Image: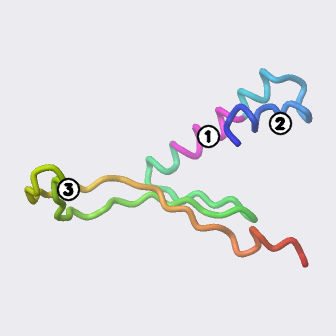
């Protein structure tokens, strides 16, 4: 499923596909902005997203075997909610 699929499903309950596209874009923009600002994003019943920065680490160029340092980078961690796969069974 991608953003277009989400918008199609959302358009069934909104007035138009254009409105659904806007809503999906806005939601993802807000989530992205919050993560870029270091905020944790929690969607109850689904899970949480948390941005973090990796540490500098040693790596190796597979072609030359040369050892090099890999710079820190920002990543996102997702943790699913406990009830995510619980269908009540």
Quadrant holding the N terminus:
top right
Apparent side of residue 52 relative to residue 83 in the rendered image (left or right): left
Magenta span covers which residues?
A: 24-32
- Of residues 65 and 22, which is closer to you in this image? 65
The CA span between labels 1 and 2 is 14 Å
Quarter of the rendering containing residue 67: bottom left
Q: Which residue is mark 2?
A: 10
Question: Which residue in the protein does label 3 denote?
Answer: 70
Q: Secondary structure at mark 2?
A: helix
Q: Which residue occupies the foreground of this view, 2 or 17?
A: 2
In reply to whether residue 77 is colored magenta, the answer given is no
> Earlier along the polypeptide chain: callout 1 or callout 2?
2
Point out residue 50 in the picture as x, y percentages from the top left corner. 50, 61
Q: Quick one: which residue is furthest to the front in this view?
A: 63
Give the mark toward the camera: 3 or 2: 3
Q: Residues within 10 Å of mark 2 (few under 14, many from 20)?
A: some
Along the line of sight, the residue nearer the viewer: 89 or 55: 89
């Amino acid at each position: 499923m991608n953003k277009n699929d989400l918008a199609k499903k959302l358009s069934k309950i909104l007035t138009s596909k254009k409105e659904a596209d806007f809503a999906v874009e806005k939601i993802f923009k807000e989530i992205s902005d919050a993560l870029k600002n270091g905020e944790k994003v929690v969607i109850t019943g689904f899970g949480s997203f948390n941005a973090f920065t990796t540490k500098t680490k040693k790596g190796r160029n597979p072609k030359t075997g040369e050892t090099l340092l890999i710079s820190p980078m920002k990543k996102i961690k997702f943790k699913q909610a406990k009830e995510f796969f619980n269908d009540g069974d």
